[in-house]
């Protein structure tokens, strides 16, 4: 009998323990920071050459406070998860999603495979153009049941939105949270180099689509090849029962799906035009739940109970995000986060040319585990690495590409990413199974990224 993998909470708390242990081993240190305006937003910028050793603060009892402090740190994401869980449970109770999927399956017939390239291209474009990331989380609750109904598995379901948006975010051509922030800090004209970035984005998106389509075809031919087969079976049965009960697509279902569509449009407009973030997204989905429930004929009391049930079912997702935030809290409180950054930057200073570009990519790859936020990592590392790029013989434009590739792809697998563990929890996919399935694609993107940096380094891309 195969040994069962540890629960994701065990993994997360183990990482908290390791982070605490590191505070007893690594020396403390910090950089001087100063306020600077980047793209119209005031941020704290690291001042190059100001790293200094200072006493570390070993963390012991703090390990028991870390999940709670992580809860406070990730409060906005956690609140969004609770609201989305409740709102989508109301939508599910209307029968609109099951009825809509049933109609979609009938319409597509033998052409269901077209869903994968079309939807993934759209979400990858959103990730590349405006940095869709957290916004993709709720779509797991739509695409997972749709993928199951089409004969695939739940892994294909989250690839349609979460992986596609993650690939677009990493290989973004205009992503304001990675490309534009890092270009602004590095002194590179905003939006420059877009032609090569578009090529990189298109190639990365194609790799992801082909990967998912090949896997989806295998699963459809033999569902037992999916590592999610046992867990997905129960969900398929529930979906089948719902479809059997709601074969007729009613006008109420149509109104509910129009409300869902309006919510998606609001999500896009809000994030791109109105500068909405977690609180506004949460309010948008809360409104969707209420209006969809009323349109679906659900009374106020049942609507409230449905919301509570949905929020309760998603509590595990909220808690694991808190644990992920706790890991970062330990590193910061122990005063070793800057020490890790300084040590890695010192190593890259010994390389030049193509190797320097690739070394800076690897540096960002490692730092992404400790600092999952793309914009935060840009603010912390670009002031240090921009002068280093000049000394290493690579352009700052190449440095920006190395940063964005290293800051993006692995965010889809690291346990310190609140978006990743939250999305997996929403999709009810165990973290350890996700890692087992997803790591070969991550390995492919490491090779892809190293190759993508060769031409810019050789021609001194600017």
Image: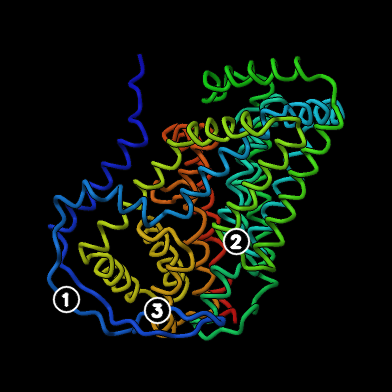
Q: Nearer the viewer, residue 457 or 181?
A: 181
- Locate residue 158, reporting x and y percent: 60, 39
Which of labels 2 and 3 is toward the front?
A: 3
Q: CA distance from mark 1 to mark 2?
A: 36 Å
Give the residue drawn at x 76%, y 32%. Answer: 296
Find numbered disc 1 in the image and state the secondary structure of the residue it sits on. Answer: strand
Q: Secondary structure at mark 3?
A: strand
Q: Residue drawn 57% across and 61% down? A: 277
Q: Is 14 placed left or right of 420 in the picture?
A: left
Residue located at (33% from left, 84% from top): 48
Question: Label 3 vs label 1: CA separation?
Answer: 20 Å
Q: CA distance from mark 2 to mark 3?
A: 25 Å
Q: Which residue is mark 2?
A: 171
Name the residue at 80% across, 27% down.
105
Is there CB contact under 8 Å for labels 3 and 1? no
Where does label 1 land, which residue?
53
| First reached walking from the N terminus: tag 3 or tag 1 | 3
Q: Is residue 1 left or right of residue 134?
A: left
Q: Secondary structure at mark 2?
A: loop
Q: Residues within 10 Å of mark 1 (few under 14, many from 20)?
A: some
Identify the disc placed on residue 44: 3
User: Toward the viewer: 18 or 136?
Assistant: 136
State whether residue 46 is above or below residue 75. Answer: below
Observer able to see residue 454: no
Among numbered discs 1 and 2, the one appearing first in the sequence: 1
Coloring basis for residues: rainbow
Answer with mark 2 or mark 3, whichever residue precedes in sequence: 3
Which mark lies nearer to you, 3 or 1?
Answer: 3
């Amino acid at each position: 009998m195969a040994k069962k993998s540890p629960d994701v909470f065990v993994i997360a708390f183990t990482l908290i323990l390791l982070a605490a242990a590191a505070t007893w081993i690594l020396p403390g240190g910090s950089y001087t920071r100063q306020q600077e305006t980047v793209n119209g937003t005031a941020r704290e910028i690291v001042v190059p050459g100001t790293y200094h050793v200072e006493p570390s603060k070993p963390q012991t009892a703090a390990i028991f406070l870390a999940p709670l402090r992580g809860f406070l740190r990730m409060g906005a994401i956690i609140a969004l998860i609770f609201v989305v869980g409740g709102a989508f449970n109301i939508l599910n109770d209307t029968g609109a999603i099951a009825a809509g999927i049933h109609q979609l399956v009938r319409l597509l017939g033998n052409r269901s495979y077209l869903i994968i390239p079309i939807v993934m291209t759209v979400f990858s474009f959103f990730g590349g153009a405006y940095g869709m990331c957290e916004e993709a989380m709720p779509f797991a609750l739509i695409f997972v049941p749709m993928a199951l109904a089409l004969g695939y598995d739940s892994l294909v379901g989250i690839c349609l939105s979460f992986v596609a948006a993650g690939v677009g975010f990493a290989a973004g051509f205009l992503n304001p949270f990675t490309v534009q922030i890092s270009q602004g800090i590095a002194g590179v004209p905003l939006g420059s180099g877009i032609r090569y970035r578009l090529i990189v984005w298109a190639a990365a998106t194609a790799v992801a689509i082909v990967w998912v389509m090949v896997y989806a075809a295998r699963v459809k031919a033999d569902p037992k090849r999916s590592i999610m087969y046992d867990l997905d079976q129960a969900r398929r049965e529930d979906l089948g029962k719902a479809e059997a009960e709601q074969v007729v697509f009613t006008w109420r279902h149509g109104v509910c799906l129009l409300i869902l569509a309006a919510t998606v449009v609001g999500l896009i407009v809000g994030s791109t035009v109105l500068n909405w973030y977690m609180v506004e997204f949460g309010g948008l989905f809360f409104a969707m739940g209420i209006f969809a429930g009323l349109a679906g004929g659900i009374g106020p009391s049942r609507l409230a109970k449905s919301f509570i049930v949905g929020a309760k079912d998603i509590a595990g997702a909220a808690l694991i995000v808190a644990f992920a935030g706790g890991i970062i809290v330990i590193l910061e409180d122990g005063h070793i986060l800057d020490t890790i950054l300084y040590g890695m930057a010192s190593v890259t200073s010994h390389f030049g040319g193509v190797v320097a570009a690739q070394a800076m990519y690897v540096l960002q790859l490692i730092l992404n585990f400790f600092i999952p936020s793309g914009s935060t990592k840009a603010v912390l590392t670009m002031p240090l690495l921009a002068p280093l790029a000049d000394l290493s013989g690579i352009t700052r434009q190449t440095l920006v590409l190395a940063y964005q590739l290293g800051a993006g792809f692995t965010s889809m697998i690291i346990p310190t990413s609140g978006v990743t563990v939250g999305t997996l929890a929403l999709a009810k996919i165990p973290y350890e199974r996700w890692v087992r399935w997803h790591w070969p694609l991550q390995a492919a993107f490491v090779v892809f990224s190293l190759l993508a940096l060769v031409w810019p380094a050789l021609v001194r891309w600017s």
